[in-house]
Amino acid sequence: MGLCVNGAVPGEATKKDENLKRGNWGNQIEFVLTSVGYAVGLGNVWRFPYLCYRNGGGAFMFPYFIMLVFCGIPLFFMELSFGQFASQGCLGVWKVSPVFKGIGYGMMVVSTYIGIYYNVVICIAFYYFFLSMNRILPWTYCNNPWNTNNCAGVLSPSSNVSVNLTTHQDLFNFTSGINQTFKRTSPSEEYWRRHVLQVSGDIGDFGEVRLPLLGCLGLSWVVVFLCLIRGVKSSGKVVYFTATFPYVVLTILFIRGITLEGAVNGIMYYLTPQWDKILEAKVWGDAASQIFYSLGCAWGGLITMASYNKFHNNCYRDSIIISITNCATSVYAGFVIFSILGFMAHHLGVNVSDVADHGPGLAFVAYPEALTLLPISPLWSILFFFMLILLGLGTQFCLLETLVTAIVDEIGNEWIIRWKTCVTLGVAVVGFLLGIPLTTQAGIYWLLLMDNYAASFSLVIISCIMCVAIMYIYGHRNYFKDIEMMLGFQPPLFFQICWRFISPGIIFFILIFTVIQYRPISYNDYVYPSWAITIGFLMALSSVICIPGYAAFKIWRSEGDTFFQRLKNAVKPSKDWGPALQEHRIGRYASISGAMSEDSPEAHPLNPEKSKKEDVSLTVQGSNGKAHSQDSKV
């Protein structure tokens, strides 16, 4: 009964969990696919191409890959190894140095913000998905009540075929001549702004709740809850489909996109560097934040997902595979986006930089325009938006599981473990209620505000402090020994150098330059008022302030007669820091293993004889008593 409550799927008696209390992944493929689904999300489709479009096309690739190599992958490996070693969520792992537990609370705050607005984007994808079930897609033509005189459709309503661009040169000469006076827009853009969102004129003018979006938001939260109703046991099965199917649709759209007239111009805009942009600190800042946003560093999700791994799993190998897959997907999606942007620009007679909306609107403007050109367009539209839903859900699963795991691990008693499903339901209900304001007519303003402030450089700050805490407070030698105990080898020298010097240094200088070149947020021609920007900064600070706030609280509560005695006691690892299972507490952890609770299921070794042997040798052992040679090599 305990296993079923804990999330095990009935009928899997042949696969015995290593950690009986928390459970483990059904197999390692589930962890890799879940992590890929977590990292490869909506940001790969609407954020990365948008950042390229805003930051000089191909010039953005250089800082992006620099940040990936020297910050992204090392921190990705650090978080995976951190969570896997302790088998704890983003709060429990800070037994390594309790004074820094505020980092875990900061991760929870960030995951909460992202989870709120991320599901709103998923709900819009649901809305488009349902509206695609028509014979003619509603954003195909310019003859709808919401369209304006500036609308320029790709298809002709009378002939239902593409307009011959080469034989209408006079039209495009005329379009180019009046373009400075009238901004030509596509029907998909007007459908997005004037029908779906019905955008108000100000961030404070909420208008009415868009009931179709509200209904879709409720549906998306129900789907997330049902997929997580049994924890990682149920979500691990879902990702076999959600993490692989999106690549099929992306490939279909890529093949169709590159066959369109003008697509080459868009791709060249995507690849051709504008090197003057590379001197702007914001370009580097966007590259760094995109790496953290895309890979999921500092969200707490990586630590949480890795905590369900078996102790000797090769997370170093997994981190390389997942990081490369994620970034390759971002670049691939950029080709699909910019081929369509090139075609739209060619049709409207404008530059590529003039044809797309900002933020998530890119996925709901450029992509729908492409879908109208495909044969049997409603079918492809259904598939595409189903792909967007799957991309979003893969990330949303981990965001919700991060919060639930942190709460359950922190309370830690048998009651909360038994009723973990109720905790999941409670978090989902709160997330739905907090997302309602984003379904109003001012919702897009708030969504972009949260995206730009709540989940941007606060991620960088949290990652930097985490790096310093582990490498310099806990000690790099201690951490390298922990990884060697777990994997059978120390982390490569490159990662050791990045963790200790390069990653924190790069992040620090990016923060300095960003402060110097800061510009207030805007949406198209709308400039955010000062009170809205203040709220944005407060959201960003709310996650970062957890770190010094909890540190002060922990020092105050620690034992000691002087401040320095209290600080010393607050910094040193807890007595129960280390591997969660008694059988893995060998070497320097063997002497303190008696401090662990004797009545805890994970405190008893699955094989007492094997535990005795491990005290003598550091050979990497599995739960079946055989050497995990295949998991200890890259």
Image: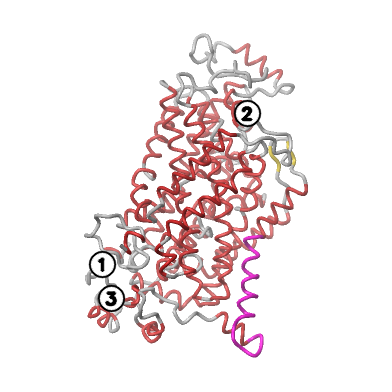
Q: In the rendered view of the protein, which quadrant contains the C terminus?
A: bottom left
Question: How would you classify the magenta stretch by its main secondary structure?
Answer: helix
Q: What residue is shown at x 50% (from left), y 60% (from top)?
A: 300
- CA separation, marks 3 and 1? 10 Å
Mark sitting on residue 381: none
Amino acid of disc 3: Thr
Q: Residues within 10 Å of mark 1 (few under 14, many from 20)?
A: some
Mark before the other along the chain sequence, 1 or 2: 2
In the rendered image, residue 560, in percent from the top left (x then y), is placed at: 61, 88
In the rendered image, residue 140, in percent from the top left (x then y), is placed at: 53, 20
**Quick one: SS at disc 1?**
helix
For the view shown, which residue lies furthest in the top direction? 158
Q: Residues within 10 Å of mark 2 (few under 14, many from 20)?
A: some
Of labels 1 and 2, the one closer to you:
1
Residue at which label 1 appears: 629
In this picture, is 265 found above or below 583? above
Mark sitting on residue 351: 2
In this picture, is 39 found above or below 260? below
What residue range appears in magenta?
542-564
